[in-house]
Image: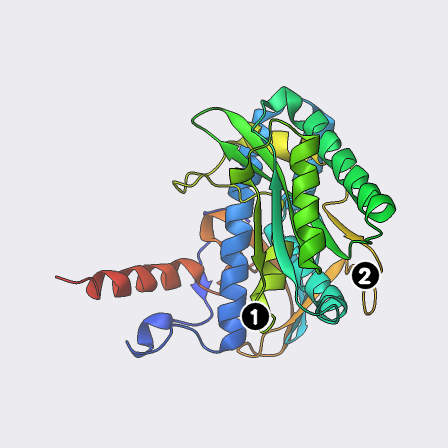
Amino acid sequence: MKANLQIKPLHYLDTLEVTSDYFKDKTHATQYYKAIRKHKTNVKLKSIIDSQDALDIKKRYWTTYHCNNVLLQDGNKFTGSLCRKRWCTECCRIKTAELTNGYKTPMQNLGQLYFVTLTRPNVKARQLKSEIKKMLSGFQKIKDNLRKTYKIKLQGIRKIEITYNHKTDSYHPHFHFIQDNLHATELMQDLWLQQFSNASIKGQDIRSIDMQDENSFIELFKYATKETTKDGATYSGEVLHTIYNSIQGLRIYQTYGSIRKVKKPIEAEQEQTELSYLDNQMEIWYFEQDYKDWITATGELLIDTISIQHQLKNKKLINLPL
């Protein structure tokens, strides 16, 4: 749908009390944040697509641009298709929930766990793919060494993460682990430093996990790249493609030892949502980037995202300390 439509919001939020949280109910708020994520994802994807010349690469990202682009309403239930790509924020959130639910109990059954980071120095874009392969090979050698020499079988989950330093134009691939056995963990770190002489002890980290804090598990599954610098600047399209291309075909998450999911979930290809604040009807909603919202052919807004954003911004300005 184009911007020349006469938009008719379904719900006017300017009549809400100032003390309200600006949403009709929880489902309204949830859909609002989905819209924000989709809008930001589309902005990111456009920057990647514009940075690439190859049509097959562009097509890969366009698939995500259309993720949940159309919502089919049946009563108060909404269904949209999912792309299941690593660069899709919404699909990554779903993946995080699937992984957390699948692995949390088996991991907790191991007892006290540790969050481990293993790193090597930054590399340039042309070296990134080969660097990740070296690191994967290095970790496999460490596992073999621990099993054969020390009779220790590591138990845990490994994740690849990549960040970017815009000041040096370099990439920082590193591993995060959640695993048991502090002694084995310390040995693993020592063997890593022995194998990679250019790795610094300052870049490695071992810390115990608060076993009552579910966020300890969620953080591991969140992302393969944070997509912003420490200063909050968004990575360029070229940088993002370099990162995503470097992990193409690789398993971002890998279990080792006896860890198995409680139940391996079937990756959903559709997302079904119930929005209780809407009247039951049969309708088709299309995402319109300019409005950060899904709209109908007659111009009705599903959320009225921009209006909510204005109100939230004004509320923050009002509450600023003098």
| Colour setting | rainbow
- In-front residue for pair 228/255: 255
Please state the horizontal and vertical placement of residue 292, each as a whole percent of the image.
48, 53
Asked whether residue 207 is in view, the answer is yes
The type of residue carrying mark 2 is Ile
Element on which disc 2 rests: loop
Query: What whole-number distance in Å separates the C-alpha atoms at marks 2 and 1?
Result: 20 Å
Residue with the most extreme left position:
322
* In front of the other: 109 or 61: 109
Picture coordinates of residue 118 (x, y %)? 62, 42
Q: Looking at the rendered structure, which numbered label has been put on residue 213? A: 1
Q: Residue furthest front?
A: 150
The numbered dot on residue 259 is 2
| Disc nearer the start of the sequence (2/1) | 1
**Apparent side of residue 304 relative to residue 157 in the rendered image (left or right):** left
Q: Is residue 259 left or right of residue 305?
A: right
Task: State the image coordinates of residue 306 (x, y, percent, origin top left).
Answer: 40, 57
Q: Position of residue 294 (x, y in %)?
A: 55, 58
Asked where in the image residue 237 lies, by quadrant, the reply is top right
Asked if 313 appears above or below 158 in the picture, the reply is below
Mark 1 surroundings: few (<14), some (14-19) or many (≥20) residues within 10 A: few
Q: Residue at x 72, y 25 (%)?
A: 130
Answer whether labels 2 and 1 touch (C-beta < 8 Å): no
Which amino acid type is marked by label 1? Answer: Asp
Residue 144 in the image: above or below residue 219: above
Label 2 crowd bin: few (<14), some (14–19), many (20+), radius 10 Å: some
Dividing the picture into quarters, in which one does residue 110 lie?
Answer: bottom right
